[in-house]
Image (spheres, rainbow, N blue to C red):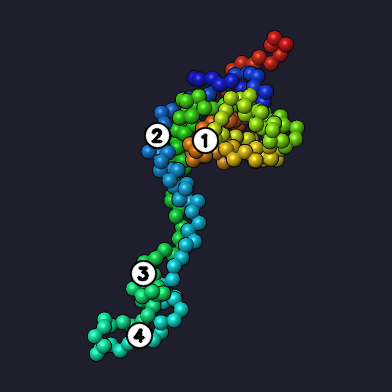
Amino acid sequence: MATVDVRRVDGSTARSMELDDTVFGITPNTSVMHQVVTAQLAAARAGTQSTLTRAEVRGGGAKPWRQKGTGRARQGSSRSPQWAGGGVALGPKPRSYRQKTPKKMVQLALRSALSDRAATGKVAVVESWTFEAPKTKDAVAALAALGVEGHVLVVVDRDDEVVSKSFRNLPEVRVLLAGELNAYDVLASDWIVFTADTLPGQAPVASDEGAGE
């Protein structure tokens, strides 16, 4: 079972924790991750697009010209789909794009995504975010001390306003509650930063609190 250092916001190591192999040590199932992420993105679509059919377009009640004798093709309405300003044939209407995804598949996709990040050493754990006040400068310094860069997903155990405000001006950082953790956000991030309380399957190993002080 792999271990990870639990660090303070200044970058110093506080203790170590084990990474649960059932969460961070499985072989990633790429097909399940693809299916779950596709379903999640589909569910996020508004599905409000709507076009007008020939019955809904205004006008066109009169027959453009008589049926016979003109030499032209017969037409019944100037709002038929082939006419400029006419209705749309087989156009989009409001609908739901939501797909049914089994709960176990969603969980497997999340564990696969976390295992993929853990395998590349892109999982970090901080003891807690000890920001006294919302300051972007403090958030940037903390991330630099932890050695994380790129797109970062910060997982917290509660809706901490100080943490949220500290990170919200950083476009490459996303703050997420532990209960909202999902495969898409994990895969869209280069680094995943947990607090000690939000690390899935956590198990304390050792502590160096006070050591050498």
Quarter of the image holding residue 69?
Answer: bottom left
State the SS at label 2.
loop
The structure residue drawn at horizontal position 41% and vertical position 74%, both measured from the top left corner, is 85
* Horizontal and vertical percent position of residue 99: 43, 51
In terms of secondary structure, where does tag 1 sit? Answer: loop
Percent position (x, y) of residue 145?
63, 24
CA gap, disc 4 and disc 2: 60 Å
Pick out the residue farthest to the right. Answer: 132
Question: Along the polypeptide, which appears first: circle 3 or circle 2?
Answer: 2
Residues marked 3 and 2 touching at CB (< 8 Å)? no
Q: Is residue 209 above or below residue 89?
A: above
Rendering coords of residue 192 (x, y %) = 55, 31
State the residue position of label 4: 64
Q: Residue at x 61, y 25 (%)?
A: 146
* Residue 157 x/y as whole percent: 64, 35
Residue in the foreground of this view, choosing between 62 and 116: 62
Question: Label 3's element?
Answer: loop
For disc 3, the marked residue is 89
- Residue ID for mark 1: 189
- Note whether 89 is above or below 205 in the view shown: below
Question: Mark 3 or 4 closer to N-term?
Answer: 4
Query: Is 121 in front, or is 66?
Result: 66
Instruction: Kindly report the distance in space between the C-alpha atoms of the residues bearing marks 2 and 1.
Output: 18 Å
Note whether residue 25 is visible: yes
Amino acid carrying label 1: it is Ser
**Amino acid type for the residue under numbered disc 3:** Ala
Q: Earlier in the sequence, mark 1 or mark 3?
A: 3
Question: Residue at horizontal 65%, vertical 37%?
Answer: 167
Give the number of the mark in front: 4 or 2: 4
In this view, the mark in front (4 or 1): 4
> In front of the other: label 3 or label 4?
4
